[in-house]
Amino acid sequence: MKKRIYIDMDNTLCDYSGKVNEIRKKSSTEVPYPQSRYGFFSSLEPLPGAIEAYKKLEEYFEVYILTAPSYKNPLCYTEKRVWVEKHLGLETTQNLIICKRKGLLKGDYLIDDYEYPEFEGHQIRIGQTPFNNWQNVLDFLLSDK
Ligand SMILES: [Mg+2]
């Protein structure tokens, strides 16, 4: 049986922080919640290597996207779905799960920039040593498929 992997979106697949910084830089006034703007989530750029890594992992694992909603921005649900179709294709939208409590889901791995102590599988904290980038994550997981 294939192992199951959950992959986060913001700051894992998508460059959330990059967009926040870009909006703040362009604005002459304080922007307290850039992520609440319409169009924010659908316009995020993929992080380097993220799309390629997702496609590679799909070959060997059961892969789902597991993202928490930005609960003050109701359009984020639609925009995250739009992003997945745009960058990973229509089929992959069937593997999109939007859920704040990631620990409710059962699986072997959670790849995320944030820590979810409630998750019972193994957590891969992307952005932190030894998982500084997607290549590090791939090297580790492909040796454990
Ligand atoms: Mg995140």
Image: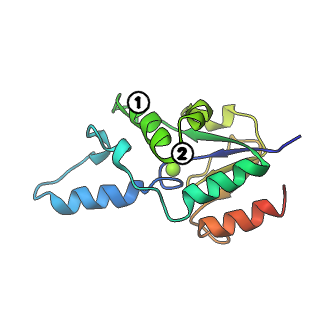
**Is residue 120 placed above or below 55 in the rendered structure?**
above
Question: What label sits on residue 78 in the rendered view?
Answer: 1
Q: CA distance from mark 2 to mark 1?
A: 15 Å
- Report the amino acid beneath label 2: Leu
Q: Identify the residue at image location x=46%, y=56%.
A: 46
Q: Nearer the viewer, residue 127 or 58?
A: 58
**Is residue 134 placed above or below 90 in the rendered structure?**
below
Q: Position of residue 122 (x, y in %)?
A: 76, 51
**Is residue 72 placed above or below 20 in the rendered structure?**
above
User: Residue most toward the left?
Assistant: 28
Does residue 139 appear in the picture of this structure?
yes
Q: Nearer the viewer, residue 15 or 101?
A: 15
Report crowding for label 1: few under 14, some 14 to 19, many 20 or more residues within 10 A (C-alpha): few
- Report the amino acid beneath label 1: Thr
Considering the numbered disc 2 on the image, is that residue within a helix, a strand or a loop? helix
Q: Which residue is identified by label 2?
A: 88
Considering the numbered disc 1 on the image, is that residue within a helix, a strand or a loop? helix
Q: Identify the residue at image location x=57%, y=47%.
A: 8
Q: Position of residue 34 (x, y in %)?
A: 27, 47
Q: Nearer the viewer, residue 117 or 134?
A: 134
Camera-nearest label, 2 or 1: 2
User: Residue most toward the right?
Assistant: 1
Quarter of the C terminus within the rendering: bottom right
Q: Position of residue 127 (x, y in %)?
A: 56, 65
* Structure colour scheme: rainbow
Upstream in sequence: badge 2 or badge 1: 1
Q: Position of residue 76 (x, y in %)?
A: 39, 34
Does residue 101 appear in the picture of this structure?
no
Side of 23 relative to 57 (left or right): left
